[in-house]
Amino acid sequence: MPDQLVMETEAADANGNLKEASAFNPQKHLMRLRGGQEYLEVKWRLVWFREEHPDWGIETSPVEIDLGQGLAIFSAKVFNAEGKLMATGTKMETRNDFGDYVEKAETGAIGRALAVCGYGTQFAPELEEGDRFVDAPIGPPREELQRGAPGAARGRAASAARVTCSSPGCTTELTRAQVEFSQKQYGQPLCPACQRKQAGRPAVGKPADDQGKNGGGA
């Protein structure tokens, strides 16, 4: 990743002729967080990204939206001009944290995907938006992604620990967002199906009378 904050580089056009790339100075748009960390908001990372790669694209899609539980998980993918997948990001948000949790999940997923491409990662080890973490930037430098780095994404995926549902007899693999949500709500990693089963049971140490009042399906 370049050390300088103003990215003034030369790039080749379709005919191989050198042309000067647009210069974006992220330093002008930094906000300072509590604790002194500097942060570049997702909207400015998008401006930076669009100036350097106007022909690249970003696609977002909902992984899971549960209005009953107040849960939204979104995935974002960054593609280069040839349609090659360059980076992905996933983010979960809940109604307890944000009223507009669906939109926040989508924004966070975009921010994480851009962070993998190198947009914003140099300003903080964990990137925060408001009072909650939106990005956890982990990934290769942008130069490696631009050169292709075919093994970069696979290496990160292979190194990630696989977590399966802790319910007896269930071997469903969970995403990191599902693990985070389940640990927060149920104290153990459960797949969505087992979460619904668990929701119909009384909490440990809860009187039986309460089960009768609150029992039922998820």
Image (tube, rainbow, N blue to C red):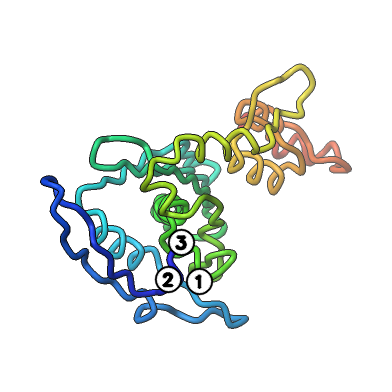
> Does label 3 or label 1 sit earlier along the sequence?
3
What amino acid type is highlighted by mark number 2?
Leu
Residue holding disc 3: 1
Q: Are marks 2 and 1 in contact (CB under 8 Å)?
A: yes
Residue 95 in the image: state x and y as whole percent. 52, 54
Residue holding disc 1: 123
What amino acid type is highlighted by mark number 3?
Met
Residue 131: quadrant of the picture? bottom right
Question: In the visual, does 207 lie left or right of 217?
Answer: right
Q: Secondary structure at mark 1?
A: helix
The residue shown at (49%, 45%) is: 90
Q: How busy is the neighbourhood of tag 3: few (under 14 within 10 Å), some, or many (20 plus)? A: few
Residue 102 seen: no
Marks 3 and 1, how far apart in space? 12 Å
Q: Are marks 3 and 1 in contact (CB under 8 Å)?
A: no
Q: Nearer the viewer, residue 126 or 188?
A: 126
Residue 91 in the image: state x and y as whole percent. 50, 48
Residue 177 in the image: state x and y as whole percent. 58, 43
Q: How busy is the neighbourhood of tag 2: few (under 14 within 10 Å), some, or many (20 plus)? A: many
Marks 2 and 1, how far apart in space? 7 Å
The residue shown at (19%, 53%) is: 12
The residue shown at (53%, 56%) is: 137
Q: Nearer the viewer, residue 79 or 141?
A: 141
For the C terminus, the quadrant is top right
> Does label 2 or label 1 sit earlier along the sequence?
2
Q: Which mark is on residue 40?
A: 2
Q: Does 132 sit above or below residue 156?
A: below
Residue 208 in the image: state x and y as whole percent. 85, 36
What amino acid type is highlighted by mark number 1?
Phe
Q: Secondary structure at mark 2?
A: loop
